[in-house]
Image: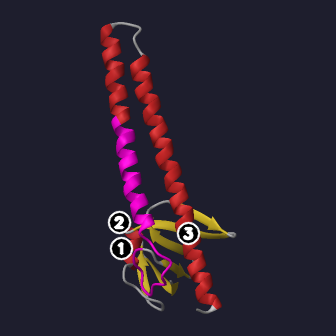
Amino acid sequence: MTALTDNKSGIKKQLIDFCIQKQNITIEAAREAMIRVQDSANEETAGGEDKFESFREQCQIDRDMYAKKINESMQGLAILKGLTTKLLFEATLGAVIITETQRFFVSIGLGEIVLDGVSYFAISTQSPLYLAMNGKKVGEHYEFRGQRFLIKDVF
């Protein structure tokens, strides 16, 4: 491998590792919130019966919401763990895409990631932006929100 190839693989590894770490933090925060809600529902016994039941129902709704968040986050984590540092040559899952204005990492929608002072945007394969660039290669253009963008590099 050349130094440039090593650098590109290194960038992908950093992006994958950062996204996995961020996703694990999201999962743990949702788990802790779900436990707090459940503990709160179990501890609440004061007040009238109607008020208590209403509170317990709201706690159950909140608990279900956190459970759904955990499930979705675990699915995202599975996607991230399936990514490799293998270099790619078209806009697809796992690719880093560089345009004249921005850098994207096609993985899951996590927003901006800054590595060594360089911004990358983690986008999912369901995002409209990705759908506009899907399958495109270096030197090709894609259109998004009425603007045309050139793909300068993909790896």
Specify few, some or many for label 3: CA neighbours under 10 Å numbering under 14, 14-19, or 20 or more. Answer: many
What's the CA distance linking mark 2 and mark 1?
A: 7 Å
In the image, residue 139 sits, relative to residue 64, either above or below, namely below
Say what secondary structure mark 2 lies in. Answer: loop
Place of residue 6 in the rendered image (x, y in percent of width and height, measured from the top left): 60, 85
What's the CA distance linking mark 1 and mark 3?
A: 21 Å
Of the two numbered discs 1 and 3 on the same chain, state the one appearing first in sequence. Answer: 3
Q: Is residue 76 left or right of residue 98?
A: left
| Residue range corresponding to the magenta coloring | 64-93
Instruction: Pick whichever, 81 or 106, lies toward us.
Output: 81
Is residue 39 a member of the stretch shown in magenta? no
Q: Which residue is mark 2?
A: 126
Q: Amino acid at mark 3?
A: Leu
**Tag of residue 15:** 3
Q: Nearer the viewer, mark 2 or mark 3?
A: 3
Task: Examine the rendering and report whether any part of residue 23 can be seen.
Answer: yes
User: The N terminus is located in which quarter?
Assistant: bottom right
Q: Amino acid at mark 1?
A: Leu
Q: Main secondary structure of the magenta part?
A: helix
Q: Is residue 115 left or right of residue 66?
A: right
**Tag of residue 131:** 1
Instruction: Pick whichever, 59 or 150, lies toward us.
Output: 59
Specify few, some or many for label 2: CA neighbours under 10 Å numbering under 14, 14-19, or 20 or more. Answer: few
Of the two numbered discs 2 and 1 on the same chain, state the one appearing first in sequence. Answer: 2
Place of residue 144 in the rendered image (x, y in percent of width and height, measured from the top left): 42, 74
Task: Examine the rendering and report whether any part of residue 102 can be seen.
Answer: no
Q: Residue at x 40, y 47 (%)?
A: 70
- Disc 2 and disc 1 in contact, CB within 8 angstroms: yes
